[in-house]
Image (cartoon, rainbow, N blue to C red):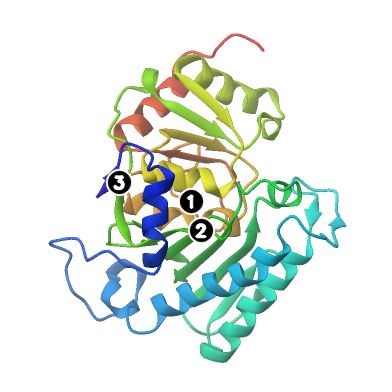
Amino acid sequence: MLGGVCPNQNFLDGLWGSVRGVATLKPGLSRCVTLTASSFDPSGLDAQLIPLALDLADAAGEVIRPLFRGELHAEYKPAASPIVTIADRQAEQRMRQILSERVPHHGVIGEEFGRKEADSPYTWVLDPLDGTIGFSTGKPLFGTLIALLLEDQPILGIIDQPIWRERWLGIRGRVTTYNGQPVQSKANRDLRKAYLSTTSPDLFATPDQKRYLHQLRQVVSVTSFGGDCYQYGLLALGCLDVILERSLALYDFAALIPVIEGAGGVITDWQGSPLHQGSPGEVLATANPQLHQQVLQLWSASPVEEI
């Protein structure tokens, strides 16, 4: 099992051929047959839905790779992510086409083309290009996010980096895999030795939001910026300890939940509550429950000085 130390490029090269691998069921997980989120049986995904999810990631990557560092055909909008490129649109269109052909009865929620309602308990949540700013500036710190919800609960998540061909697959009740190999998040239990990451300090606009970040930065050992969804893959891989974000929508965080939890980490909102469709978009992810509790205790202590 990988974990605790970031793999080098030679190791990454050796894993490229096993991107589609799936880790085995965790020992002791009970078997069940009812299609409900509370009694979910991951073995029921193996025959059709895991291969389908991997095919979606493959298809999105085939669209994105030729467009990277090419003509963007960008549209601009007044939002936290102000750019939409041809890669965003075409990758989501391709994934939706595959879903309509193979599981037309499933629901779909996508960043670029909205929601398709369905009677099925299954809903696919797609972010074809999480990190569009990075993509549009030629930085390969972005990814495709694919989640499968069962009754609104994420049971499968993929973070796919199509340029470096890195893929994290998380399935509820199973160990997260990285290019087919099981992974483990960092074992560090000391927040003072932690590596913190966030996409940008500009995400924290109000005085209260700035205090959350500032107070955490005052305690941890290292703070880094940038990465969007890629940084969550790095946390699962054992390279980061804590990630703090805000302004995330369902399509930004749904796929992250099975990936982080399957690697031994914790991902919640800033109050420690589970993420859901109505969450305000404030996300805290840590490598283990002990670090998560330390962060929450830090914030609940006396307020830091004014910034």
Name which of mark 2 and mark 1 comes first in the sequence. Answer: 2
Give the Cα separation between the discs numbered 1 and 3: 17 Å
Q: Secondary structure at mark 2?
A: loop
Residue type indicated by callout 1: Leu
Give the Cα separation between the discs numbered 2 and 3: 17 Å
Which residue is nearer to you in this view: 266 or 170? 170
Give the Cα separation between the discs numbered 2 and 1: 8 Å
Name which of mark 1 and mark 3 comes first in the sequence. Answer: 3
Relative to 65, say whether 276 is above or below. above
Residue 76 in picture, x, y percent from top left? 87, 54
Residue 123 in picture, x, y percent from top left? 52, 74
Name which of mark 2 and mark 3 comes first in the sequence. Answer: 2
Residue 114, visible in the rendered structure: no
Q: Secondary structure at mark 1?
A: loop
**Residue at label 2?**
254
Residue 56 in picture, x, y percent from top left? 53, 74
Q: Are marks 2 and 3 in contact (CB under 8 Å)?
A: no
Instruction: Please state which of the two labelled residues, at mark 1 or mark 3, is closer to the viewer.
Output: 3
**Quarter holding residue 25:** bottom left
Q: Which residue shows up at 66% across the image and 29% down it? A: 201
Work out which quarter of the rendered image holds the C terminus and state it.
top right
Relative to 278, say whether 3 is above or below. above
Any mark on residue 275, and which?
Answer: 1
Q: Which residue shows up at 40% across the image and 33% down it? A: 241
Most extreme residue toward the top is 305
**Quarter holding residue 257:** bottom left
Q: Is residue 33 left or right of residue 16?
A: left
Q: Are marks 2 and 1 in contact (CB under 8 Å)?
A: yes
**Residue at label 3?**
264
**Quarter holding residue 205:** top right
Q: Which residue shows up at 55% across the image and 12% down it? A: 304
